[in-house]
Amino acid sequence: MSYKIPMIDLKEELKLIRTPILEMMTEVLDSGEYILGEKGEQLEKIIASYVQASYGLGTANGTDALLLALKALDIGPGDEVITTPLTFFATGEVIAEVGAKPIFVDIDEETYNIDPTKIEKAITKNTKAILVVHLYGKAANMKDIMDIADAYGLKVIEDACQAIGTEYNGKRVGAIGDVGCFSFFPSKNLGAFGDAGFIVTNQKEIYEKIKSLRNHGSKKKYHHSLIGMNSRMDEFQAAVLLVKFNFLDIFLHKRKEVAKRYSEDLPSILRTPDKHNNREHTFHQYCIELDKRDELASFLNNKGIATAVYYPIPLHLQEAFDYLNYKLGDFPVAEKVAKRILALPISPTLTFRDQNYIISCVKHFLQG
């Protein structure tokens, strides 16, 4: 039998929800209301409530959500924002985009998230915020991070783009810091049918400012009190997300089942995701670590199994950040992980048969 197993099978997922999706999108078509309409408002209330936040706002994408968060906190030229080097490029990109300076801090090897024990050494008189990433769906150590932020008067932005539904000490990530940002890119655990993002906050002043900023700095049509941008979630994406939200907890449970099976059945020679009692993992990615990462990826590809590396080049070594003058060796943990980490297919629709095939292929490679 010929196998072709993708990282996430969106086509198979669609089979489960096609009818309600089409019905909801037809409602949008018939309404003639395509931007900042009823579906978007409904989604904002539902997601904010789910994340346990007071306010929610839809945006055009997750990158814009991060950018708007920085703008709303008045972060700009001359300011510094501390973040992790092991993340998608957008995390550092938005800091530079507002004219601030990204300051990278190495990661905790157990969680792949920023190491709180290394943050204080990076704080200067110009530090204004910590941009925390909950990588792969695993919560960062928010207690220690919030304690540091409180001690130094810093703002905390949560990049929860991969972590909707993830909990830390019983609280959903995104609503722990000052502002939380989510991505609903199609491959995310809650994915739209195109680009879409979301912001949550418990502070009314921040909510009102972002609401204006995402709409050209306008609260009243043709009256602009701020220099804003155009970053509004359209009604079609909101409609898709309203339907898919009904399946979110079911799909997250399925992901956890797949992850558990991997962790129980994969050889102990591999490093699999660590468990923490106070941090729930929602497994946007299931990542293993091994020295022969590239060889295993090639082997699995030849067997029809997709894999991916998140992320092969830490941000401090990206060409775009050459001006920051970081060098190889500055963040050894992130650099080591970037050479060893490999994501295996994980999807709520991944079958036992396909997962067993993946596991058997990994074992075969390791035994060879």
Image: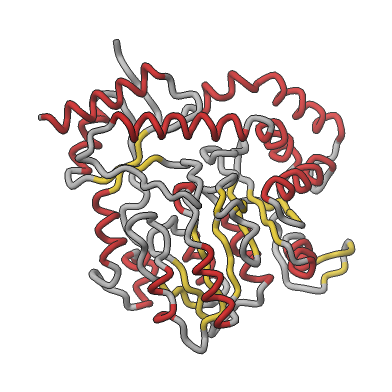
Q: Is residue 201 above or below residue 299?
A: below
Considering only vertical position in the picture, is 262 above or below 97?
Answer: above
Asked which quadrant contains residue 64, the reply is bottom right
At x 57%, y 61%, the residue is: 158
Q: Residue furthest left?
A: 368
Where is residue 314 shown, x and y percent of the image? 34, 61
Return the x and y of residue 204 as percentages of the image width and height: 79, 66
Rendered location of residue 353, percent (x, y): 37, 16
* 216 vs 282, nearest the viewer: 282
- Left/right placement of residue 104 relative to residue 61 reads left
Question: Closest to the observer: 189 or 325?
Answer: 189
- Could you say where residue 87 lies in the image, as x and y percent from the top left? 42, 57
Q: Nearer the viewer, residue 305 or 340?
A: 340
Q: Which residue lies furthest to the top in this view?
A: 1
Residue 206 sits above or below residue 188 on the image: below
- Quadrant housing the N terminus: top left
Residue at (32%, 58%) from the top-left corner?
A: 109
Question: Is residue 157 left or right of 341 when viewed as pictured?
Answer: right
